Image (cartoon, rainbow, N blue to C red):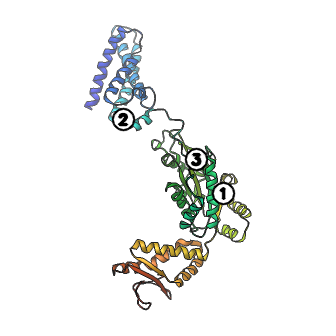
């Protein structure tokens, strides 16, 4: 309260000074004098660039200083004329000027207290943030790089991908060829490629997107989980809220990621779960390779990204098509026709290629499980020397029964079956183990132990 009274006293003194100036400078709006004095005072106390008082959001300070000064001058001038016996109508002008000055002064008081527009001063110590805050929005953000693959050997890339993704060799071959071909075109304003991976869960779709990022782009992966994009407002997470809405000062998460990474793999996982407004937004990204942030109007380039969409939609029908249709072009056409149950034709038309992931074969299942077992043993801290082939046969049979759950469910069963045995072996000081199966039990044995002995067992 004392600060407010002090503010009013200061305003009264300024008003008296302005009355004096009014007689000295006839016809000059005293609001300009107040604005000038206010700008000088603020500039002295706050490190705001002078131009920000005339362009950008801090310009509201100049306007409030003007209203406060002009209102106070109007009130005091008309009150003075009342004392000289001039018409009583002057009282209304005096009252209006006083109310305007009071309102402007109260707003200025709250701003400088940090109760209104606190970010004007909170960011003053950050030059980069300050410049972005007080400047007009740029037309475009820094443009992304092209996906440079000149130093890569295509055969080597395929081999590296095969180490990560098992049982999808034909897809790896075609996909790598497409990416290299499209990247060499360096199409300005277009993504490097837009592809869709369709098929059952656990077939390797998401893993392939991750592998592409690791092999081609040093791990630069932007992942959007579309099961979190089921509302219309989800678009604001990607491109920011409109100006004036809550969170508009934070910008769009996807826009920031594009600006930071410049090139890599952009993954939209389970795209069929995204809200139609989200997919509508992405269609412009597929077409023009850019996103426009709502809060700033800046555009962010995706021309250096391979855009990957994954979907589990209609996976049973797609698996049947992959199994029964041999001709690649005919297979692709039938898969696209099937996906039109979920996606609109204009959405599919913006995708360069749809890759169909069929069910994993028995050999692929055995290889994946074996690879997992060796990797899991290393994580536990023991060396796996051998795996009983009967175990792999049993797991393949279980995979047939759990087909709808994908390979992940089989891997969970294996982990559950061997975890305790491996931990017990490590606790007992055994550095190497082997895994066998006896009936319905999976056993983890020290590598040097005979078949009859055992160390830890579990039911698979």
Q: Is residue 194 visible?
A: no
Question: Judging from the image, what secondary structure is the residue with disc 1 in?
Answer: strand
Question: Judging from the image, what secondary structure is the residue with disc 2 in?
Answer: loop
- Callout 3 touching callout 1 (CB < 8 Å): no
As drawn, the label of residue 353 is 1
User: Viewer-nearest of labels 2 and 3?
Assistant: 3
Q: Position of residue 357 (x, y in %)?
A: 63, 66
Marks 3 and 1, the one that precedes in the sequence: 3
Marks 2 and 3, the one that precedes in the sequence: 2
As drawn, the label of residue 124 is 2
Q: Residue at x 33, y 30 (%)?
A: 46
As drawn, the label of residue 303 is 3
Question: Judging from the image, what secondary structure is the residue with disc 3 in?
Answer: loop
How many numbered badges does the structure rendering display?
Answer: 3
As drawn, the label of residue 317 is none
Rendered view: 141 above or below 167: above
Q: Position of residue 262 (x, y in %)?
A: 51, 47
Q: Residue at x 45, y 80 (%)?
A: 385
Q: Is residue 353 left or right of residue 78?
A: right
Q: Is residue 322 visible?
A: yes
């Amino acid at each position: 309260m004392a600060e407010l009274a002090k503010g009013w006293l200061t305003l009264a003194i300024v008003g008296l000074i302005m009355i004096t100036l009014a007689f000295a400078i006839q016809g000059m709006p005293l609001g300009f004098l107040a604005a000038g004095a206010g700008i000088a005072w603020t500039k002295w106390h706050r490190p705001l660039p002078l131009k920000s008082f005339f362009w950008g959001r801090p310009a509201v300070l100049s306007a409030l200083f003007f209203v406060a000064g002009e209102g106070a001058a109007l009130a005091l001038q008309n009150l003075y004329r009342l004392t000289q016996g001039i018409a009583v109508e002057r009282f209304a002008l005096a009252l209006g000027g006083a109310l305007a000055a009071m309102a402007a002064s109260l707003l200025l008081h709250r701003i400088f207290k940090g109760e209104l527009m606190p970010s004007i001063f909170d960011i003053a110590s950050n030059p980069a943030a300050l410049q972005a805050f007080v400047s007009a929005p740029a037309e475009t953000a820094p443009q992304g790089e092209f996906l440079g693959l000149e130093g890569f050997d295509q055969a080597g890339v395929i081999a590296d991908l095969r180490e990560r993704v098992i049982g999808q060799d034909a897809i790896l071959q075609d996909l790598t060829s497409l990416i290299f071909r499209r990247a060499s075109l360096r199409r300005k304003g277009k993504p490097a490629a837009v592809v869709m991976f369709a098929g059952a869960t656990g077939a390797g779709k998401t893993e392939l997107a991750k592998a592409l990022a690791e092999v081609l782009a040093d791990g630069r992966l932007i992942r959007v989980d579309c099961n979190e994009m089921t509302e219309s407002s989800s678009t604001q997470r990607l491109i920011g809220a409109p100006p004036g809405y809550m969170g508009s000062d934070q910008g769009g998460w996807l826009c920031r990621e594009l600006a930071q990474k410049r090139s890599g793999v952009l993954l939209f996982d389970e795209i069929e779960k995204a809200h139609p407004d989200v997919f509508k937004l992405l269609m412009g990204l597929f077409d023009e390779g850019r996103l426009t942030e709502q809060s700033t109007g800046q555009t962010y380039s995706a021309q250096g990204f391979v855009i990957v969409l994954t979907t589990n939609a209609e996976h049973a029908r797609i698996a049947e098509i992959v199994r029964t249709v041999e001709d690649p072009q005919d297979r692709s056409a039938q898969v696209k026709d099937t996906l039109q149950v979920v996606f609109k034709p204009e959405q599919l038309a913006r995708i360069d290629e749809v890759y169909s992931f069929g069910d994993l074969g028995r050999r692929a299942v055995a290889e994946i499980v074996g690879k997992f077992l060796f990797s899991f043993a290393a994580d536990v801290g023991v060396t796996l020397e051998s795996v009983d082939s009967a175990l792999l046969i049993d797991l393949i049979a279980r995979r047939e029964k759990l087909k709808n759950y994908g390979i992940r469910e089989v891997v969970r069963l294996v982990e559950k079956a061997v975890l305790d045995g491996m931990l017990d072996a490590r606790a007992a000081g055994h550095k190497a183990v082997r895994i066998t199966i006896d009936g319905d039990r999976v056993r983890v044995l020290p590598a040097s132990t005979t078949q009859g002995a055992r160390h830890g067992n579990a039911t698979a």
